[in-house]
Amino acid sequence: MTLFDQRSLLPVFLCLWCFLFLAQNPPAEGQEKLPSVFVAKTEASAANGDFVRARRNAVAQAMKLAVEKCLREILGEREYDANLKTANVLIADAERYVRSYRFLRAYDDIENSKSEVDLEVSLFVDAIRRRLGSHGIIEAPSPSKVVAVLVHEKRGAGKESAAFWESSPVSEKLLARSFISAGIRVVTRDSVQGSVGAETIARAARGDIGAAADIGQKAGADIVVVGNAVASPLDEGGSGKTVQASMSLKAFSAYKFRAVAAKSDLASARGPTEAEAETEAMDKVAKKLGEFFLSSIQRYWNPALAAQPDVSSPSPAAPVNPQEDL
């Protein structure tokens, strides 16, 4: 056979090899790329001519229909029917899994007293997968070792507390630094803002595991650390300013729907100005709590460490009410 003949047959051999390889190694189940956008067409009756409420109900139904379509894509018809009870739980909570939506069509049918909508709904498909995995219906995606840190901070007595998303808390940045320095990826506040509401964060800070799981699933974080930080001036006289900083935090696993750790602590500092004293006091308490939560999270991720004694010294509980600020 000539060199020319060998070269002309090379593409044939390559095609044959690829065919045999794919036949013997099909894509793993569940690895196929699912759509994240679903179109849902729904209608709702306008009782007493209330088309505003009818439109709102139609949108809610469209969200549920979109989640139902997503579940059928993930599970297939047979598994969907076999796990209908769990599917209905997720569908009833559809809004939790909606990233965004837009109207393709909206029409108020005055004659038939109903509102019709065609909605394009973008979903958090990974969050739906993780929720199904937590119920043991599908293999749960392997949790990535990522931490989301969200702290509501109030600084200075008598100062008005800024809205959660309008603030840039020093305590949150200092706490995140403890995880980053240990090589752990931390989800930034900006990347979560568009998908998680402040009320959800408030509920998580009060101990609502479902709310914490919602945050983690949308942020792509295994661990969610939430809580409050308060800096208050202390009138001790003399030159300079003294400030006491207190912080109360909780950590949850978004994948296993369980609490990982909880702790409160406080520290005080004195500086030439109140702002400098606040920052130093926050830095002190953030370091103490950062060490505690870093150790707790590492033990959670590596059960072998759980058998070892915890050498971190206990700290007094800080008088922070997790419900007062968020």
Image: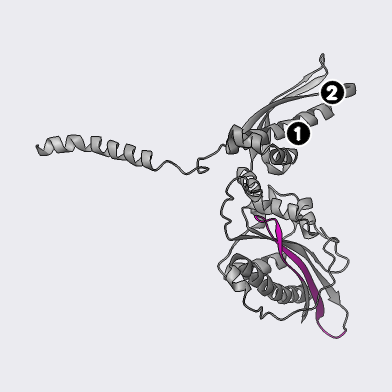
Residue located 79% across and 73% down the image: 245
Q: Can residue 172 be seen in this view?
A: yes
- Whichever of labels 2 and 1 marks the residue nearer the N terminus, that label is 2
Task: Report, in whole angstroms, how far the alpha carbon at label 2 lies from the one at label 1.
Answer: 14 Å
Name the residue that disc number 1 marks: 60
Q: Do callouts 2 and 1 mark residues in contact (Cβ within 8 Å)?
A: no
Q: Is residue 54 magenta?
A: no
Would you place residue 245 above or below residue 207 in this image?
A: below
In this rendered view, identify the residue nearer to me: 236 or 87.
87
Magenta segment range? 237-263
In this view, the residue farthest toward the bottom is 238
Please tell me in which quadrant of the rendered image residue 53 appears: top right
Please tell me in which quadrant of the rendered image residue 148 appears: bottom right
In this rendered view, identify the residue nearer to me: 149 or 82.
82
* Crowding at mark 1 (Cα within 10 Å: few <14, some 14-19, many 20+): some
* Crowding at mark 2 (Cα within 10 Å: few <14, some 14-19, many 20+): many
Q: Does the magenta stretch include residue 258?
A: yes
Name the residue that disc number 2 marks: 46
In this rendered view, identify the residue nearer to me: 178 or 90.
90
Residue located 87% across and 23% down the image: 47
In this view, the residue farthest toward the top is 111
Would you place residue 16 above or below residue 222 in this image?
A: above
Element class at badge 2: loop
Question: What amino acid type should be assigned to the residue bearing mark 2?
Answer: Ala
